[in-house]
Image (spheres, coloured by chain):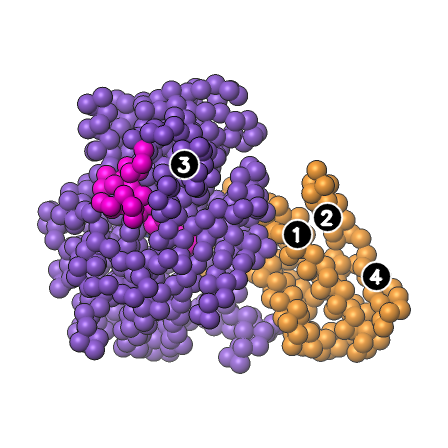
Chain colours: A orange, B purple
């Protein structure tokens, strides 16, 4: 039963509980993982929003998905912490308080690190999943991703989401 | 009309069902037996650990099927351990759940045959006598089959008719003999780009083959024809055109199927299997008594079940007093490659043709099924050409890196995705050559790690013989020539000893010598009177083609043997 209890804890608290960010051992403040991830998604692929795709909402679906491993979910959350630590080291400010160009430079810096590259890759992958998701997932109501590329999805289309 | 699946009888805890034949696993290996024996009036019960999905359940939801693996068990609940042996002799242990290394292929009624692409090739006569024709290779346990191509040929033909194989019979120097001149079903429609392929091949002096497919081009056999749904491999077929074991066989017979029935042990005395024990989804245990037991849980799981069924007569696992169960596991050797066909090199009408969605590519080469190197005759293989899968997320994800190998985002990524999706198409190839059987590639059961049922998980001990890579390289280089001739760009390939989990065989090889094989010529365990194995586990060598046509054919052959036995009894 320990595992089950842990799972439900993870589900309810994963994105809502703040992450404490420290700079050289000193507590700097708390950041919201959901807000940071949404901002990073937009910094990495703003075109999703322009298409009318709600990529942050999809990330919420993915992070509650029974088929995504806890380790992958925890990695995404840890990445928020490491990203902010990088922002503090470089600009003495948390990521969300930085200017757009400063945020890009932080993304560039972390992309050179192994964890950073993996983290950006994961966020981009979920963003692509949102962009090409079927309407049943509720985040791409107008098939905008498919229309953007003239992509023919397979048929028949699904009638209910697998979450 | 497809018949509904019967539940047989309600599997209350402790109730013991008695049938003529009990089959474990409802995929390509088990279903021909279920079909033939139930249609002949015998009582057949199939125990299948997965759920039942039918045509109406199959949609092309990339997120569910390809990203979240809807049709295979969660690795947190059921996994394999992989012991990979490296060149320097070291062995690294990977637990599947931790490393996300997945060897499941399709847990559902009909098994992974629901999800196959259905590229169908017969094995060639020389594949049945690899040792005699090509000689021994150091470090490889090559043997001749106890069966000839001629004996299996009528069953290949039967598969064409019952499963439904479409295509045009190729006449080339390695074409296998056939007892019928043509396929019963005409070829599927193909993309016009195949013309460029054919032209390139003819300039190179290669023989372009129209790949046979286990797909119906039109309504037949009580199933609908292909709708060219654009997502074939990895996805269930909503029309029934794909020759899955479920659509072609199980839906057309009265065999009873109990779903979500995980068989965890076979019980035996010294001569006969007495009972199959299985857990239902609520972990209630049930048992089935039968005159004959047929295991077809797919290679790896079949060996695992036998190894986990130890008892006082078979201390090393059922039918394993000679220590051969799990040995000589094989996969399809080879690898894959690709090239990009770009608009820049095509006329306007060619560009339109290239982008036609849904139509197949369906081209293969077998010019090097056998070739000479340094005066020695070598066994080569098959190359299948196909368009890159239409899955959008995976296609977009491959654009995440620039030429320098750095991850990109923003406009740079957006433009790259747009350009590659809208003005080019990737043509891929897959190389199939023998994965030579060795002592180092085998299945065992882990001593400690258990799955959600509390059963020891299977261990896949991996090792690829260097010869496999050599042959794969040779074939890939020939495939590259065709892509170059077609004007493809960004050509690349990868031949490796990393195994394709969906093309797996061996572990219970058949043979005449009971000391060196698990099964006899009829796929009956040497050591037991009523235990048969009818999936690809029986194959001592795999041929240089994907296995499923041979699995189906052999299972029909075994069904005939079982019919003889049951009729006599
Ligand atoms: C994406 C994909 C593409 C493919 N493309 C091709 C192709 O183009 N050409 C080709 O020739 N082949 C192809 N294949 C391979 C083909 O599907 C397999 O060769 C074939 O289905 C194997 O048959 P099988 O009976 O051994 O296993 P399966 O068809 O997988 O059936 C085994 C069944 O046993 C069940 N089972 C396992 N353990 C137990 C247990 N303990 N108790 C009860 N039930 C159990 C499983 O749930 C499963 O349903 C492809 C496979 C995949 C996944
Ligand atoms: S309809 Fe045709 S293309 Fe679609 S899954 Fe079935 S066989 Fe494949």
Chain under disc 1 = A
Q: Secondary structure at mark 1?
A: helix
Q: Is residue B348 visible?
A: no
Cα separation, mark 3 vs mark 1, equals 40 Å
Chain under disc 4 = A
What residue is shown with label 3? B314
* Same chain shared by disc 4 and disc 3: no
Tell me the number on the disc at residue A20.
4
> Magenta residues, as a range?
B501-528
The residue sitting at the bottom extreme is: B404
- Image quarter of the N terminus of chain B: top left
Give the residue displayed 50% in from the left and 63% down from the top: B91
Q: Secondary structure at mark 3?
A: loop
**Which percent across, then down, holds residue A136?**
56, 46
Q: Earlier in the sequence, mark 2 or mark 1?
A: 2
Q: Earlier in the sequence, mark 4 or mark 2?
A: 2
> Neighbour class for label 2 at 10 Å: few (<14), some, many (≥20)?
some
Quarter of the view holding residue B95: bottom right
What residue is shown with label 2? A10
Chain under disc 3 = B
* Same chain shared by disc 4 and disc 2: yes
What residue is shown with label 1? A70
């Amino acid at each position: 039963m320990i595992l089950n209890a842990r799972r439900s804890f993870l589900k309810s608290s994963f994105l809502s509980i703040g992450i404490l960010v420290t700079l050289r051992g000193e507590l700097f403040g708390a950041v919201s993982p959901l807000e940071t991830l949404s901002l990073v998604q937009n910094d990495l692929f703003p075109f999703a929003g322009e298409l009318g795709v709600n990529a942050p909402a999809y990330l919420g679906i993915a992070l509650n998905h029974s088929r995504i491993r806890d380790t992958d979910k925890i990695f995404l959350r840890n990445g928020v912490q490491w990203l902010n630590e990088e922002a503090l080291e470089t600009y003495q400010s948390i990521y969300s308080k930085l200017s757009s160009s400063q945020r890009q430079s932080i993304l560039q810096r972390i992309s050179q690190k192994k964890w950073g590259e993996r983290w950006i890759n994961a966020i981009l992958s979920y963003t692509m999943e949102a962009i090409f998701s079927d309407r049943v997932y509720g985040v791409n109501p107008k098939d905008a991703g498919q229309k953007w590329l003239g992509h023919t999805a397979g048929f028949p289309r699904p009638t209910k989401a697998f979450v | 009309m497809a018949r509904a699946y019967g539940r047989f009888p309600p599997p209350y805890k402790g109730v013991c069902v008695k049938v003529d034949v009990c089959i474990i696993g409802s995929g390509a290996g088990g279903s021909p037996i279920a079909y033939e024996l139930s249609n002949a009036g015998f009582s057949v019960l199939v125990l299948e650990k997965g759920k039942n999905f039918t045509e109406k359940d199959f949609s092309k939801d990339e997120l569910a099927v390809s990203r979240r693996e809807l049709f295979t068990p969660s690795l947190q609940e059921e996994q394999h351990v992989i012991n990979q042996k490296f060149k320097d002799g070291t062995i690294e242990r990977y637990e599947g759940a931790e490393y996300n290394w997945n060897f499941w292929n399709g847990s559902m009624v009909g098994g992974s045959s629901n999800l196959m692409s259905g590229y169908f090739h017969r094995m060639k006569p020389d594949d049945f006598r690899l040792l005699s024709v090509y000689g021994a290779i150091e470090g490889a346990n090559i043997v001749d089959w106890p069966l000839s191509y001629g004996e299996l040929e009528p069953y290949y033909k039967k598969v064409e008719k019952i499963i439904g194989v479409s295509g045009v019979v190729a006449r080339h120097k390695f074409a296998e003999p056939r007892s019928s001149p043509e396929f019963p079903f005409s070829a599927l429609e193909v993309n016009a780009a195949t013309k460029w392929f054919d032209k390139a091949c003819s300039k190179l002096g290669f023989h372009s083959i129209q790949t046979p497919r286990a797909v119906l081009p039109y309504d037949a056999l009580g199933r609908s024809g292909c709708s060219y749904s654009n997502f074939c491999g990895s996805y269930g077929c909503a029309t029934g055109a794909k020759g899955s074991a479920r659509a072609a066989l199980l839906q057309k017979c009265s065999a009873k199927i109990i779903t979500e029935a995980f068989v965890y042990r076979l019980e035996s005395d010294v001569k006969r299997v007495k009972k199959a024990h299985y857990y239902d989804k609520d972990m209630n245990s049930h048992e089935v008594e039968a005159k004959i037991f047929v295991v077809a849980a797919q290679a790896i799981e079949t060996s695992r079940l036998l190894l986990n069924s130890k008892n006082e007569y078979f201390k090393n696992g059922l039918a394993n007093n000679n220590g051969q169960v799990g040995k000589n596991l094989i996969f399809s050797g080879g690898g894959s490659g690709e090239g990009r066909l770009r608009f820049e090199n095509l006329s306007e009408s060619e560009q339109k043709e290239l982008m036609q969605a849904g139509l197949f590519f369906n081209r293969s080469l077998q010019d090097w099924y056998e070739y000479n190197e340094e005066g020695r005759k070598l066994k080569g293989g098959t190359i299948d050409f196909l368009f890159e899968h239409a899955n959008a997320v995976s296609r977009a994800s491959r654009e995440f890196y620039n030429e320098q190998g750095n991850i990109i985002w923003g406009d740079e990524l957006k433009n790259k995705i747009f350009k590659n999706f809208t003005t080019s198409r990737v043509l891929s190839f897959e190389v199939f050559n023998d994965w030579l059987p060795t002592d180092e590639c085998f299945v065992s059961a882990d001593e400690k790690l258990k799955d959600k049922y509390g059963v020891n998980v299977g261990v896949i001990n991996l090792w690829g013989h260097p010869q496999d890579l050599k042959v794969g390289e040779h074939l890939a280089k020939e495939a590259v020539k065709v892509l170059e001739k077609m004007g493809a760009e960004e050509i690349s390939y990868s031949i490796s000893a990393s195994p394709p989990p969906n093309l797996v065989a061996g572990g219970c090889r058949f043979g005449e010598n009971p000391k060196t094989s698990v099964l006899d010529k009829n796929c009956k365990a040497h050591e037991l009177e009523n235990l048969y194995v009818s999936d690809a586990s029986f194959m001592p060598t795999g041929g240089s083609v994907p296995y499923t046509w041979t699995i189906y054919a052999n299972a029909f052959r075994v069904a005939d043997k079982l019919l003889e036995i049951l009729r006599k009894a």
